[in-house]
Image: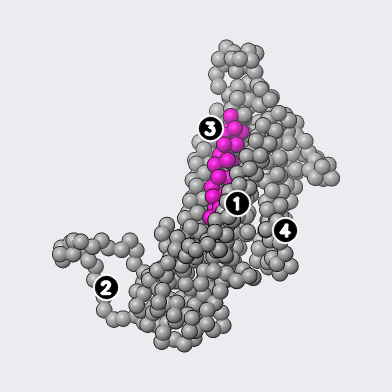
Amino acid sequence: MEATVVKTGTEGKTWGGGNDPLKASYGKMMMWFFILSDALTFSGFLAAYGFSRFKFVDAWPIPDEVFTHFPFLHGVDAPMYYVAFMTFVLIFSSVTMVLAVDAGHKMKQNKVIMYLFLTIIGGLIFLGSQAWEWATFIKGDYGAIETKGGQIVQFLDKEGERVALRDFAVVAAGERTEQTKEKGIWYKEEAEYYPSVSFEQVKAGFLANDNLLVRIQHKDEHGHHIVLNREESIAKVVNDGALVVEGANLRHNEYGHPLFADFFFFITGFHGFHVATGVLINCIIFFNVILGTYERRGHYEMVEKVGLYWHFVDLVWVFVFTFFYLV
Amino acid sequence: MAHEHKLEIFRGALKFKSNVSKIWGVFIVLSIVTVVEVALGIIRPAFLVEHHFLALKLLNWIFIILTLFKAYYITWDFMHMRDETAGLRRSIIWTSIFLIIYLVTLILIEGDYIFEVYKNGYIKFDF
């Protein structure tokens, strides 16, 4: 097995790096050790997620209730189907990648081109899906109230179905005027995001509608969020309510604890960054294959090394899928 | 580069004629496991949710074991760990398994401890 770089005159000399330790070429072994260190980085993130979750174990959002959307199916409760689809896309792109590696071993240039192309397409579909997932998560669903203590209070009707803020808030007439320096309000900054309804409107609508209850972040012994009765609900909203939260950002999260959103953005974002770089590297290799670089070099080991990275991205997703969506 | 592949999975219970058919076989195995995971995640059988082992729900143990199962086949067959020398395999796998178990154990114990302090201590939920 030749090294992929030009010859350095150290062939056969152990201390010059000329031999293949562990029968793996320099590039492949280093890719493995890079993957090892990257795996430890990801496990550090996931362990931090586990730490925060254990810390607030009785008040953590239930993923089945957070990720319930599927593109083009509005109002259909589809917990996890979309993430399952994304998992399949990534596993399938791993399959086409390993088929490309296999075709490379057999020096079949056209097959390598076809399989690499499919792999890139799979990666792009995954990235698009993740963007959609993020957008849905950021946009939010039903909306919620945050208390002064930072807890999330969500609204339900008597049947236990979730109710959206926009469906019961008393929307006052009149336009919202923006504060500007030109109008002399130099001492106040605009809020970082505007909910579609104000807290006072939600409160008025809630008090006017006897059918509404709230549920709090804390869970009972069966793992369901505790639903308060009407009197407790009113007391909770009137005494503790502070602001309206719609969707999720790094500070507020309508689905529950803000750390859930923080870790979601950070871990799936870091994984998505890996997928994006993986697609980029795959594209570079793809064009090299088309140009015949590896045909002239005499072997397709570069496809194998990039393949290792791509499989690693799939491997990480398997764990993210489990710990974010299933457990 | 190992051109010759070991073509058996499940400790030889399943043998394939070529590397390509082994790849498709592994893909089918991984797909079945994913379908089982998603089905369990949606149904959440009451028995598995209510019973615990080592402070974790049985269902969560099943998810973790299935995940490790999938990780094994991705690493062994897609990343060709099966065909590498024992030295390379151990230097990657043993190192990562040891460090990850060590880190996760300590951090989860610490998280649980803080949960107990919040619950039974005097600090109100205001973080």
Q: Position of residue A21 (x, y in %)?
A: 66, 22
Other-residue count near label 1 (Cα within 10 Å), few / some / many at <14 / 14–19 / ≥20: many
Chain of the residue that carries numbered disc 4 in the rendered image: B
Residues at marks 2 and 1 on the same chain: no
Quadrant position of the C terminus of chain A in the picture: bottom right
Q: Which residue in the structure is indicated by mark 3?
A: A288
Given residues A81 and B68, the one toward you in this image is B68
Q: Nearer the viewer, mark 1 or mark 3?
A: 1
Tag on residue B108? Answer: 1
Main SS category, magenta section: helix
Chain of the residue that carries numbered disc 3 in the rendered image: A
Residues at marks 4 and 1 on the same chain: yes
Q: Which residues are magenta?
A: A30-52
Other-residue count near label 3 (Cα within 10 Å), few / some / many at <14 / 14–19 / ≥20: some
Distance from label 2 to label 3 (Cα)?
A: 56 Å
Given residues A62 and B67, the one toward you in this image is A62
Identity, as a three-letter code, of the amino acid under mark 4? Phe
Chain of the residue that carries numbered disc 1 in the rendered image: B
Q: Which residue in the structure is indicated by mark 2?
A: A176
Residues at marks 4 and 3 on the same chain: no
Q: Nearer the viewer, mark 2 or mark 4?
A: 4
Q: Which residue in the structure is indicated by mark 4?
A: B53
Disc 4 to disc 1: CB gap under 8 Å: no
Chain of the residue that carries numbered disc 2 in the rendered image: A
